[in-house]
Image: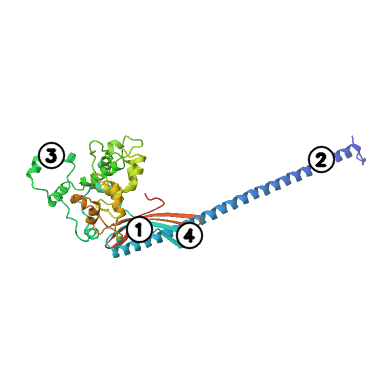
Amino acid sequence: MKSPGCCFCPADAARGGVRAANSRSGLQRQRGVALITVLLIVFLASVTAAGLAALQQTAIRRSTVLQHQQQARLYTLGVEQWALLALARDGKQNETDHPEEAWAKASVLLPVKEATISGRIRDLQGCFNLNSLWQTSAKPQSPNSENDARDNPTGDNPPPDGPKQDRPKQSDGKDSAQDQAKKPPPTEPQAQNSDEAEPGKGRLNEAQFQVLQRLLARLELKPELAQAIVDWIDPDQDPIFPDGAEDSDYNVLTPPYLAANRPMLSVSELRQIKGVDQDSYDKLSPLVCALPPDAPLNVNTAPALVLAALAEGKDPKDIEQVLENRPTDGYKNVDEFLNAADLSLEARLKNQIGVASQHFLLQVEARVGDGRAMLYSTLYRDKNGVRVLRRAFGNPD
Ligand SMILES: [Ca+2]
Ligand SMILES: [Ca+2]
């Protein structure tokens, strides 16, 4: 038993020394843990700060690019206004459109500070109009009056001939060959009555159908492709025999789809048509366009391959020779071109070509810093001026 009067005990002193040593060791460990914690906090704070700085840099760069991109888009719209004025001025100055005119000759290259702007206007009627294959109206193919005035200021073109022939497979049997023989030659009022009976059905444009077949043959493609193209445009579900294609040909594909059964909105629709592969698309697409059915072909801007397809047996090389000798101001009327090219066309086809254009494509590219904008505008010109029919940023289709 411990004596209460005892003031020194060697055992207690030893235990006290041990406790003091343990206390010092614990303090050192705590200091180590605190130091590690502080270092960890500093590390995490540094990482977080670096991340925030990177995010901020990205946000600043993104907003800068967006600002440049928006500025570039505004520049392209400015060039569009310039194109409208240029075409309007041209329309007042002359009644023909050809590659030597100011709007077609020079590419736009505007000197804008810290930006690059370039663009060009292309005539859209210098190509075969795929939508002309199908006439949606009973009236014979006829450019409107104002277009007549522009395309044929001298009035040399003959009036449209009688109504085009309906597709034989669409006959309902009422008009047999004998009945046709007994009937007087069809007149325009009869065609209108026929159209009233079947509103909106339209008919095949045989003349343009033959032109497309000849063009395909010149490109060493199957002329039968023209049948599938007509079926894609015509509103019915009756395939043209034997190589046409309607819904029944497309809805068994993977993925399935249906024929458009309306005028094409873009030449790129050709990719969906039966028989059109990449090779045939690459050959055909630069020479064709998708315009309203009554838009005439401009012989002043059309390539030799398309012009040669207007007549059977015409060599494109002969047409190229003719185009090289084209008058500086372009052909004044269709007859002048036909005489120069030694071409003789039937009246209904002759009425579907002209020397002026109403549809144009403006292509503009603007670069501002890291921003870039591409604008494709389809422009339409008539006696009331020039206006934008369609506007697409980034992609012409
Ligand atoms: Ca002109
Ligand atoms: Ca069809």
- In the picture of the structure, the residue carrying the numbered disc 4 is 115
Packing grade of label 3 (10 A; few <14, some 14-19, many >=20) is few
Q: How far is mark 2 from mark 3, CA to CA? A: 116 Å
Q: Earlier in the sequence, mark 4 or mark 3?
A: 4
Q: Are marks 3 and 1 in contact (CB under 8 Å)?
A: no
Q: Position of residue 16 (x, y in %)?
A: 86, 40
- In the picture of the structure, the residue carrying the numbered disc 3 is 173
- In the picture of the structure, the residue carrying the numbered disc 1 is 104
Q: Nearer the viewer, mark 4 or mark 3?
A: 4
Q: Earlier in the sequence, mark 4 or mark 1?
A: 1
Taking the image as drawn, is residue 14 in sight?
yes
Q: Is mark 2 within 8 Å of ligand 2?
A: no
Question: In terms of image quarters, where does ligand 2 lie?
Answer: top left
* Secondary structure found at label 4: strand
Depicted 153 relative to depicted 218: above or below: below
* Secondary structure found at label 3: loop
Q: Nearer the viewer, residue 382 or 389?
A: 382
Q: Earlier in the sequence, mark 3 or mark 1?
A: 1
Q: Are marks 2 and 4 in contact (CB under 8 Å)?
A: no
Q: Give the residue drawn at x 63%, y 48%.
A: 47
Q: Position of residue 210 (x, y in %)?
A: 23, 44
